[in-house]
Amino acid sequence: MHWAGASLRFQEHEFKTRTVYGDIPGANLLDWPITLADLEPFYDLAEKKMGVTRTNGIPGLPGNNNFKVLYNGATRAGYKMVSTGPMAINSEPRDGRTHCYQRGFCFQGCRTGAKWSTLYTEIPKALATGKCELRAKAQVVRIEHDARGRVSGVLYYDGEGNLQRQRARAVCVAANAIESARLLLLSASPMFPKGLANSSGQVGRNYMRHLTASVYATFPHKVEMFKGTTMAGIVEDEARLDPKRGFVGGYHMETISLGLPFYAAFLNPGAWGRDFTRALDQYAYTAGMWIVGEDMPRETNRVTLNDAVKDAYGLPVPNVHYDDHPNDVAMREHAFQRGAAVYEAAGAKEVYRVPPYPSTHNLGTCRMSEKPRDGVCNKFGQTHDIANLFISDGSQFTTGGAENPTLTIVALAIRQSRYIADQMKQGAI
Ligand code: SF4
């Protein structure tokens, strides 16, 4: 619901970071067990399903004012790959949904249904097949297994707060990287004392959230960045591999506009004082960009259970620990400088560097690996330890890439679903 719609494919080298970047001290880099070529047919299917602009003959979105400022500054600063991006937002009516009305605030959910969202695109289609049942407001609290160590079902609280058991032939976990890892850890048993699928000790580790930072700038004339699509504006030049910049990996600059409360909560200079109120007074004259770059996976950046704090069901809440790697710090500094250069080239009066939001693209806590000792699941998201337990969300990312992850999550899910169907047909699960 809350995503912006940016749908970029990973680059080839981003599947092979350990090989291409080398041994970066303090980073737990690992090559994915798949390549771009493996995923390309599924990217094709995902783009078609999601109606990604600039693919399958779908025209790009028009540029709003925030894009025009970014475009003018970026092209004057020498960037070449600047467009309204590949977006999973209808630029024309498609798939029974209308086109984007450019009303803005896409992060709140798209009022017209122009933006692809599982809530009103995939789930209704699945329900219409008669083969899918949706149990809303349910929360799974434990995955159960049998005496052979195969998962056998889940325990969940239904919408009325009653504990229910659902038996299952296979379980796919897709609760986002923090809750997916938490659920595996919460499901520890005498047979799996460290949690399910955790013989490697990697469940919860290598938590990534992308580099993230923002640059905002004020201009003499009104920009009204909030009018129109939030993120239809992408500069791709800095996403290249070029260690001469002082870091490995790359980043994208993408237009962003936040509603005033969200904007005020994170703005730097923040919280109070004349500098803060002056910046807020300039809201209508402000343009914004978000930096999304590849952060380093680290074993110590991890999700663990906090036994001292319990949720509504009496279960330990997740603790999330994250420290920047020096590579992340170097990349962010570069991105801040280049972002400022873009807006200065467009005639900015003032430029604000805004540090990362605390949580963005949660990735990597149940990563794919060739060898079971290095990760949690194989190249199909099937856990190394338990053949009928699958990781189906961004938790399975081995590394994060410099791209917004949803398109890759969808491509992996399509690929995984075919594998599961095949495995079931063969009677392997
Ligand atoms: S601007 Fe965003 S929220 Fe509004 S119609 Fe377009 S995609 Fe939907």
Image: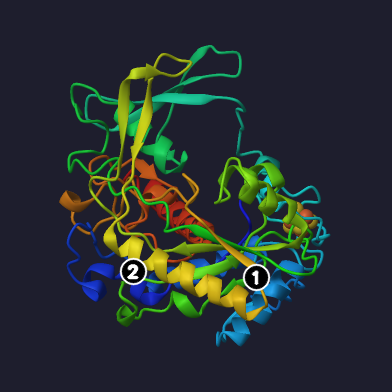
Q: Does 347 sit left or right of 269 as displayed? A: right
Q: Does 312 sit left or right of 258 as displayed? A: left
Residue at mark 2 to residue at mark 1: CA–CA distance: 25 Å
First-in-chain label (2 vs 1): 2
Residue 30 visible, this angle: yes
Q: Nearer the viewer, residue 59 or 206?
A: 206
Question: Label 1: how many residues lie within 10 Å, few (<14), some (14-19) or many (20+)?
Answer: many
Q: Position of residue 331 (x, y in %)?
A: 38, 67
Question: Label 2: how many residues lie within 10 Å, few (<14), some (14-19) or many (20+)?
Answer: many
Instruction: Return the residue at label 2.
Output: 15
Q: Position of residue 317 (x, y in %)?
A: 39, 25
Please name the residue shown 56% across and 46% down the image.
270
Instruction: Return the residue at label 1.
Output: 233
Residue 179 to residue 100: above or below: above
Q: Position of residue 48 (x, y in %)?
A: 63, 67
Mark 1 beta carbon near ligand 1 (under 8 Å) = no
Q: How many marks?
A: 2
Q: Quadrant of the C terminus?
A: top left
Residue 318 to residue 47: above or below: above
SS at badge 1: loop
Q: Does 339 sit left or right of 4 as displayed? A: left
Tell me which amino acid carries mark 1.
Gly
Residue 124 visible, this angle: no
